Amino acid sequence: MTYHQPITIAVAKGRLLRNTLPLLARIGIQPLVVDMDQTRKLILETSQAQIRLLLIRATDVPTYVQWGAADFGITGKDTLLEHGGANLYEPLDLQIARCQLWVAGYPDTDTRIQRLRVASKYIRTSQAFFQARGQQINLIKLYGSMELAPMVGLADVIVDLVESGNTLQANGLVPLEHICDISARLIANKAAWKMKQATCRYWVDALQAVLSSESA
Ligand code: PRP
Protein backbone atom coordinates (compact mmCIF):
# COMPACT_ATOMS: atom_id res chain seq x y z
CA MET A 1 0.00 0.00 0.00
CA THR A 2 1.44 3.38 -0.96
CA TYR A 3 1.18 6.50 1.13
CA HIS A 4 2.09 8.70 -1.80
CA GLN A 5 -0.98 8.90 -4.01
CA PRO A 6 -1.68 12.37 -5.47
CA ILE A 7 -3.80 14.51 -3.18
CA THR A 8 -5.56 17.78 -3.98
CA ILE A 9 -6.52 20.03 -1.09
CA ALA A 10 -9.00 22.87 -1.58
CA VAL A 11 -8.22 25.70 0.82
CA ALA A 12 -10.22 28.83 1.51
CA LYS A 13 -8.55 32.09 0.52
CA GLY A 14 -8.31 35.12 2.80
CA ARG A 15 -8.33 35.14 6.56
CA LEU A 16 -8.67 31.37 6.82
CA LEU A 17 -5.65 30.80 4.57
CA ARG A 18 -3.38 32.76 6.90
CA ASN A 19 -4.33 30.32 9.67
CA THR A 20 -4.21 27.24 7.46
CA LEU A 21 -0.73 27.65 5.93
CA PRO A 22 1.21 27.44 9.23
CA LEU A 23 -0.71 24.27 10.10
CA LEU A 24 0.07 22.66 6.73
CA ALA A 25 3.71 23.73 7.09
CA ARG A 26 3.89 21.77 10.33
CA ILE A 27 3.12 18.55 8.45
CA GLY A 28 5.63 19.42 5.73
CA ILE A 29 3.28 20.91 3.12
CA GLN A 30 4.44 24.32 1.91
CA PRO A 31 3.32 26.09 -1.29
CA LEU A 32 6.09 26.62 -3.85
CA VAL A 33 5.40 30.30 -4.41
CA VAL A 34 7.57 33.17 -3.36
CA ASP A 35 4.85 35.56 -2.26
CA MET A 36 1.50 34.07 -1.21
CA ASP A 37 -0.11 37.52 -0.96
CA GLN A 38 0.85 38.51 -4.49
CA THR A 39 0.26 35.32 -6.43
CA ARG A 40 -2.69 35.13 -8.81
CA LYS A 41 -2.25 31.39 -9.28
CA LEU A 42 -5.18 29.18 -8.30
CA ILE A 43 -3.36 25.85 -8.28
CA LEU A 44 -0.21 25.70 -6.18
CA GLU A 45 2.38 22.94 -6.23
CA THR A 46 3.86 22.22 -2.83
CA SER A 47 7.02 20.95 -1.17
CA GLN A 48 5.35 17.49 -1.34
CA ALA A 49 5.48 16.59 -5.04
CA GLN A 50 2.21 14.61 -4.90
CA ILE A 51 0.23 17.32 -3.10
CA ARG A 52 -1.30 20.43 -4.65
CA LEU A 53 -3.47 23.17 -3.25
CA LEU A 54 -6.48 24.83 -4.87
CA LEU A 55 -7.10 28.40 -3.71
CA ILE A 56 -10.82 29.11 -3.73
CA ARG A 57 -13.57 30.99 -1.93
CA ALA A 58 -14.52 29.49 1.43
CA THR A 59 -18.10 28.86 0.29
CA ASP A 60 -16.89 26.93 -2.78
CA VAL A 61 -14.60 24.55 -0.83
CA PRO A 62 -17.36 22.00 0.04
CA THR A 63 -18.54 21.99 -3.59
CA TYR A 64 -15.08 21.12 -4.98
CA VAL A 65 -14.69 18.35 -2.40
CA GLN A 66 -18.25 17.05 -2.79
CA TRP A 67 -17.74 16.51 -6.53
CA GLY A 68 -14.27 15.03 -6.13
CA ALA A 69 -12.37 17.88 -7.80
CA ALA A 70 -10.44 18.00 -4.51
CA ASP A 71 -9.80 15.09 -2.14
CA PHE A 72 -9.63 17.27 0.96
CA GLY A 73 -10.83 20.75 1.82
CA ILE A 74 -10.28 23.22 4.62
CA THR A 75 -13.05 25.66 5.42
CA GLY A 76 -15.14 27.04 8.27
CA LYS A 77 -17.89 25.11 10.05
CA ASP A 78 -20.23 28.01 9.17
CA THR A 79 -19.75 27.22 5.48
CA LEU A 80 -20.27 23.50 6.08
CA LEU A 81 -23.51 24.05 7.99
CA GLU A 82 -24.84 26.05 5.04
CA HIS A 83 -23.67 23.45 2.52
CA GLY A 84 -25.31 20.56 4.36
CA GLY A 85 -22.39 18.10 4.09
CA ALA A 86 -23.58 15.87 1.22
CA ASN A 87 -20.85 13.45 0.08
CA LEU A 88 -18.40 14.76 2.65
CA TYR A 89 -16.61 13.41 5.68
CA GLU A 90 -15.45 15.84 8.34
CA PRO A 91 -12.53 13.97 9.95
CA LEU A 92 -10.94 16.82 11.91
CA ASP A 93 -11.71 19.98 13.81
CA LEU A 94 -8.56 21.99 13.04
CA GLN A 95 -9.16 24.30 16.02
CA ILE A 96 -8.10 27.37 14.08
CA ALA A 97 -10.06 30.44 12.94
CA ARG A 98 -12.30 30.11 15.99
CA CYS A 99 -15.32 32.38 16.28
CA GLN A 100 -19.02 32.11 17.07
CA LEU A 101 -22.28 32.43 15.22
CA TRP A 102 -24.73 34.83 16.90
CA VAL A 103 -28.08 36.47 16.44
CA ALA A 104 -27.17 40.13 16.86
CA GLY A 105 -28.93 43.47 16.83
CA TYR A 106 -29.73 46.47 18.97
CA PRO A 107 -29.91 45.91 22.74
CA ASP A 108 -33.47 45.13 23.96
CA THR A 109 -34.54 43.69 20.60
CA ASP A 110 -37.23 41.06 21.14
CA THR A 111 -35.86 38.14 19.13
CA ARG A 112 -38.85 35.89 19.88
CA ILE A 113 -41.52 37.73 17.88
CA GLN A 114 -43.20 35.98 14.97
CA ARG A 115 -42.14 37.25 11.55
CA LEU A 116 -38.83 38.53 12.96
CA ARG A 117 -36.88 39.97 10.04
CA VAL A 118 -33.48 38.25 9.93
CA ALA A 119 -30.71 39.32 7.55
CA SER A 120 -27.88 36.88 6.94
CA LYS A 121 -25.73 35.03 4.48
CA TYR A 122 -26.42 31.96 6.63
CA ILE A 123 -29.90 31.17 5.31
CA ARG A 124 -30.03 27.47 6.12
CA THR A 125 -28.51 27.85 9.60
CA SER A 126 -30.76 30.78 10.49
CA GLN A 127 -33.85 28.95 9.30
CA ALA A 128 -32.91 25.85 11.33
CA PHE A 129 -32.20 27.84 14.50
CA PHE A 130 -35.53 29.67 14.58
CA GLN A 131 -37.54 26.74 13.22
CA ALA A 132 -36.26 24.53 16.07
CA ARG A 133 -38.23 26.69 18.50
CA GLY A 134 -41.28 27.04 16.29
CA GLN A 135 -40.63 30.63 15.30
CA GLN A 136 -41.49 31.88 11.83
CA ILE A 137 -39.08 34.43 10.44
CA ASN A 138 -38.66 36.52 7.32
CA LEU A 139 -35.20 35.85 5.92
CA ILE A 140 -33.28 38.41 3.91
CA LYS A 141 -30.24 37.04 2.07
CA LEU A 142 -27.14 39.23 2.19
CA TYR A 143 -23.54 38.57 1.14
CA GLY A 144 -21.57 40.78 3.55
CA SER A 145 -21.55 43.86 5.79
CA MET A 146 -24.57 42.38 7.55
CA GLU A 147 -24.27 44.82 10.49
CA LEU A 148 -25.72 47.52 8.27
CA ALA A 149 -29.12 45.81 7.98
CA PRO A 150 -30.58 46.68 11.44
CA MET A 151 -29.02 50.13 11.26
CA VAL A 152 -30.98 51.15 8.18
CA GLY A 153 -34.18 49.25 9.02
CA LEU A 154 -33.68 46.43 6.53
CA ALA A 155 -33.91 43.80 9.29
CA ASP A 156 -34.61 43.46 13.04
CA VAL A 157 -31.55 41.26 13.62
CA ILE A 158 -28.66 39.64 11.78
CA VAL A 159 -27.14 36.19 12.03
CA ASP A 160 -23.39 36.59 11.65
CA LEU A 161 -19.96 35.52 12.84
CA VAL A 162 -18.52 37.26 15.86
CA GLU A 163 -14.81 37.01 16.58
CA SER A 164 -13.57 39.96 18.65
CA GLY A 165 -16.98 41.66 18.76
CA ASN A 166 -15.41 44.87 17.45
CA THR A 167 -17.57 45.13 14.32
CA LEU A 168 -20.81 44.84 16.31
CA GLN A 169 -19.59 47.32 18.90
CA ALA A 170 -18.44 49.86 16.32
CA ASN A 171 -21.96 49.87 14.92
CA GLY A 172 -23.87 50.04 18.21
CA LEU A 173 -25.04 46.41 18.03
CA VAL A 174 -24.72 43.58 20.55
CA PRO A 175 -24.74 39.79 20.45
CA LEU A 176 -28.23 38.63 21.49
CA GLU A 177 -28.37 34.85 21.12
CA HIS A 178 -25.52 32.37 20.71
CA ILE A 179 -26.14 29.86 17.91
CA CYS A 180 -22.93 27.79 17.85
CA ASP A 181 -19.15 27.80 18.03
CA ILE A 182 -17.27 27.82 14.73
CA SER A 183 -13.78 26.69 13.72
CA ALA A 184 -12.04 25.50 10.57
CA ARG A 185 -12.61 21.85 9.63
CA LEU A 186 -10.85 19.36 7.42
CA ILE A 187 -13.32 17.73 5.04
CA ALA A 188 -12.79 14.79 2.71
CA ASN A 189 -14.52 13.45 -0.38
CA LYS A 190 -16.15 10.13 0.54
CA ALA A 191 -14.95 8.25 -2.56
CA ALA A 192 -11.38 9.56 -2.25
CA TRP A 193 -11.41 8.58 1.41
CA LYS A 194 -12.09 4.97 0.38
CA MET A 195 -9.94 4.77 -2.75
CA LYS A 196 -6.88 6.56 -1.34
CA GLN A 197 -7.40 5.30 2.16
CA ALA A 198 -3.78 4.86 3.24
CA THR A 199 -2.70 8.24 1.88
CA CYS A 200 -5.71 10.05 3.34
CA ARG A 201 -5.16 8.36 6.70
CA TYR A 202 -1.48 9.30 6.65
CA TRP A 203 -2.17 13.02 6.26
CA VAL A 204 -5.09 13.08 8.68
CA ASP A 205 -2.96 11.30 11.30
CA ALA A 206 -0.15 13.80 10.72
CA LEU A 207 -2.52 16.71 11.26
CA GLN A 208 -4.06 15.03 14.28
CA ALA A 209 -0.60 14.58 15.82
CA VAL A 210 0.18 18.29 15.38
CA LEU A 211 -3.17 19.29 16.91
CA SER A 212 -2.71 16.91 19.82
CA SER A 213 0.80 18.22 20.53
CA GLU A 214 -0.53 21.80 20.51
CA SER A 215 -3.38 21.08 22.93
CA ALA A 216 -1.16 18.99 25.26
C1 PRP B 1 -16.81 38.91 9.57
C2 PRP B 1 -18.22 38.89 10.13
C3 PRP B 1 -18.27 40.17 10.93
C4 PRP B 1 -16.84 40.30 11.43
C5 PRP B 1 -16.75 39.81 12.84
O1 PRP B 1 -16.83 39.70 8.45
O2 PRP B 1 -19.17 38.85 9.08
O3 PRP B 1 -18.63 41.27 10.14
O4 PRP B 1 -16.01 39.47 10.60
O5 PRP B 1 -15.45 39.97 13.37
P1 PRP B 1 -15.20 40.76 14.75
O6 PRP B 1 -16.17 40.22 15.76
O7 PRP B 1 -13.77 40.42 15.10
O8 PRP B 1 -15.39 42.21 14.49
P2 PRP B 1 -15.70 39.66 7.33
O9 PRP B 1 -14.59 40.55 7.71
O10 PRP B 1 -15.30 38.24 7.07
O11 PRP B 1 -16.45 40.29 6.09
P3 PRP B 1 -17.95 40.17 5.54
O12 PRP B 1 -18.69 41.37 6.07
O13 PRP B 1 -17.78 40.21 4.07
O14 PRP B 1 -18.57 38.88 6.01
Image: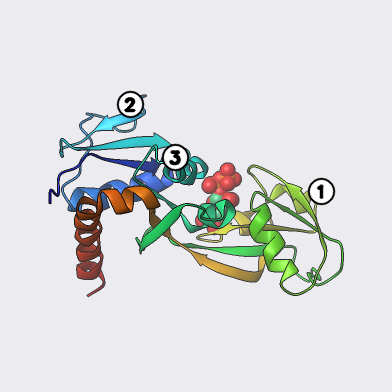
Of mark 3 and mark 1, the one earlier in the sequence is 3
What numbered label is drawn on residue 64?
Answer: 3
- Please name the residue shown 20% across and 36% down the image: 46
Towards the viewer: 167 or 62: 62
**Residue 39: which disc?**
2
> Residue 56 in the image: x percent, y percent?
43, 36
Amino acid type assigned to the residue bearing label 1 in the image: Leu
Which disc is residue 154 wearing? 1
**Left or right: residue 151 compared with residue 88:** right
Tell us which disc is closer to us: 3 or 1.
3
For the residues labelled 3 and 1, the Cα–Cα distance comes to 33 Å
Q: Quadrant of the C terminus?
A: bottom left
Residue found 19% across the figure and 59% down from its top? 206
Q: Do the residues labelled 3 and 2 touch (CB within 8 Å)?
A: no
In the rendering, which numbered label is found on residue 79?
Answer: none
Looking at the rendered structure, the kind of residue marked 2 is: Thr
SS at mark 3 in the image: helix
